[in-house]
């Protein structure tokens, strides 16, 4: 199988994660056309950031991640900022995958095994974490193949979900708008989070290998982002056409209430695939940041990456939409500003492109913090 196919599968699978399940609910809050406007603007910004970071990656020595890139191009202070932002955003992402991944696994297995007499979601969250942690330990060579076949299965299950839901479609449901003006800014952080896979670009570059393979990096990025957007639009359409105003922040549960338990199981499988692959790749990337850039031992890096989100989950942080919105709007905004600064260093003749992107990212961070403090 060509390396670029594995690379596309890995990047798409790392982008399409828990964020997808917030999108139908948010769309119902703000309206379909408002959501399309957000995707048009933020999707364009993300395309630019991905291509910029690809150029930075190609001129930077291998076996570095974002903090190492920042130090190489901008100095030690930038490395500290990048490290803090990337560690916090990665841990927040892994926590979000853990929150809903355990719910999806529980939805699949609990009707069969009936673990205990009460709520068994914590057990299935731990099982989800345990399997994902084992795969993170195996490293990228094993993960690449898992990502690819998970990517294939992802589309099979999405098609099956469409088949089950087709008899319940009502196109009039797409016109639903349940929120008010206070919900207008709701999509920003969730969409940025849902499109964010920039941390994987150095990993993808390494997967493509040496010689002429690295010239394929930009092609891989463009194809991956287009596939991601297609998946998101299809899922929003599918969920809203079935559930309409009844959609909630756990989109799969909305489908279960209308279509029935059989389709719900298919939906839970879809959710499990989407979150599990991203859980693995996010964990793998953070582990390598700690190991390569901070020079922490591989064992300690692995432990910090995998155990901190689990501990935070059992402390009681278990609401995924606030987690992904805050991470998307703030920490990922910081990483985006660092990418712009690095790109400016290697392409100073394109300063004209920097200012509107800087303003958008900074405004997004400020508004996201204000929105959630309220």
Image (cartoon, helix red, strand yellow):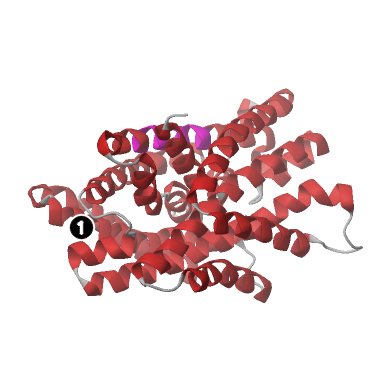
Q: Position of residue 319 (x, y in %)?
A: 62, 63
Q: Position of residue 147 (x, y in %)?
A: 54, 42
Query: Which residue appears at 12% of the width and 49% of the height?
Result: 347
Name the quadrant containing residue 260. top right
Q: Magenta stretch containing residue 161, yes or no?
A: no
Q: Is label 1 in a helix, a strand or a loop?
A: helix
113 displayed left or right of 181: right
Q: Magenta stretch containing residue 230, yes or no?
A: yes
Q: Residue furthest right?
A: 117
Residue 354, relative to residue 210: is it above or below? Answer: below
User: Which is more toward the observer, 210 or 126?
Assistant: 210
Name the quadrant containing residue 160. top right
Query: Which residue appears at 41% of the width and 34% of the height?
Result: 3
358 displayed left or right of 35: left
User: Which is more toward the observer, 295 or 90?
Assistant: 295
Q: Position of residue 88 (x, y in %)?
A: 45, 69
Query: Which residue appears at 24% of the width and 57% of the height?
Result: 358
Magenta residues (range): 221-233
Say few, some or many: other residues with alpha carbon within 10 Å of mark 1 (under 14 / 14 to 19 / 20 or more): many
Name the quadrant containing residue 64. bottom left
Look at mark 1 in the image and give the residue it sits on. Answer: 342
Residue 365, relative to residue 173: is it above or below? Answer: below
Would you say the magenta stretch is mainly helix, strand or loop?
helix
Residue 173 visible at all: no
Query: Which residue appears at 47% of the width and 64% of the height?
Result: 287
163 displayed left or right of 89: right
- Count of marks overlaid on the render: 1
Q: Position of residue 68 (x, y in %)?
A: 29, 64
Residue 85 visible at all: yes
User: Which is more toward the observer, 18 or 367?
Assistant: 18
């Amino acid at each position: 199988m060509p390396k670029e196919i594995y690379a596309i599968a890995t990047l798409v699978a790392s982008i399409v994660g828990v964020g997808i399940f917030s999108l139908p609910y948010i769309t119902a809050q703000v309206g379909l056309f408002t959501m399309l406007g957000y995707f048009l603007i933020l999707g364009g910004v993300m395309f630019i950031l991905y291509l910029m970071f690809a150029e930075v990656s190609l001129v930077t020595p291998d076996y570095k991640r974002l903090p190492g890139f920042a130090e190489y191009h901008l100095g030690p202070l930038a490395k500290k900022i990048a490290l803090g932002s990337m560690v916090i955003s990665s841990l927040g992402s892994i926590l979000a995958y853990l929150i809903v991944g355990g719910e999806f696994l529980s939805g699949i297995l609990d009707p069969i095994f009936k673990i205990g007499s009460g709520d068994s979601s914590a057990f299935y969250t731990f099982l989800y974490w345990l399997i994902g942690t084992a795969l993170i330990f195996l490293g990228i060579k094993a993960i690449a193949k898992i990502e690819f076949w998970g990517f294939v299965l992802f589309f099979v299950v999405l098609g099956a979900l469409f088949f089950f839901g087709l008899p319940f479609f009502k196109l009039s449901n797409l016109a639903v708008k349940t929120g008010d003006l206070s919900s207008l800014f709701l999509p920003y952080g969730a969409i940025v989070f849902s499109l964010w896979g920039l941390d994987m670009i150095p990993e993808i570059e390494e997967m493509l290998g040496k010689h002429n393979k690295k010239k394929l990096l930009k092609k891989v990025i463009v194809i991956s982002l287009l596939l991601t957007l297609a998946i998101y639009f299809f899922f929003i359409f599918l969920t809203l056409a079935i559930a309409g105003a009844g959609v909630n922040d756990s989109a799969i549960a909305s489908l279960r209430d209308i279509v029935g338990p059989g389709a719900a199981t298919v939906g839970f499988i879809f959710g499990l695939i989407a979150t599990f692959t991203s859980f693995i790749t996010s964990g793998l990337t953070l582990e390598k940041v700690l190991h390569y850039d901070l020079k922490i031992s591989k064992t300690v890096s692995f432990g910090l990456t995998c155990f901190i989100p689990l501990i935070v989950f059992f402390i009681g942080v278990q609401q995924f939409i606030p987690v992904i919105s805050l991470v998307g709007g703030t920490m990922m905004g910081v990483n985006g500003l660092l990418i712009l600064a690095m790109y400016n260093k290697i392409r100073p003749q394109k300063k004209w492109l920097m200012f509107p992107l800087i303003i958008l990212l900074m405004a997004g961070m400020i508004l996201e913090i204000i929105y959630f403090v309220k």
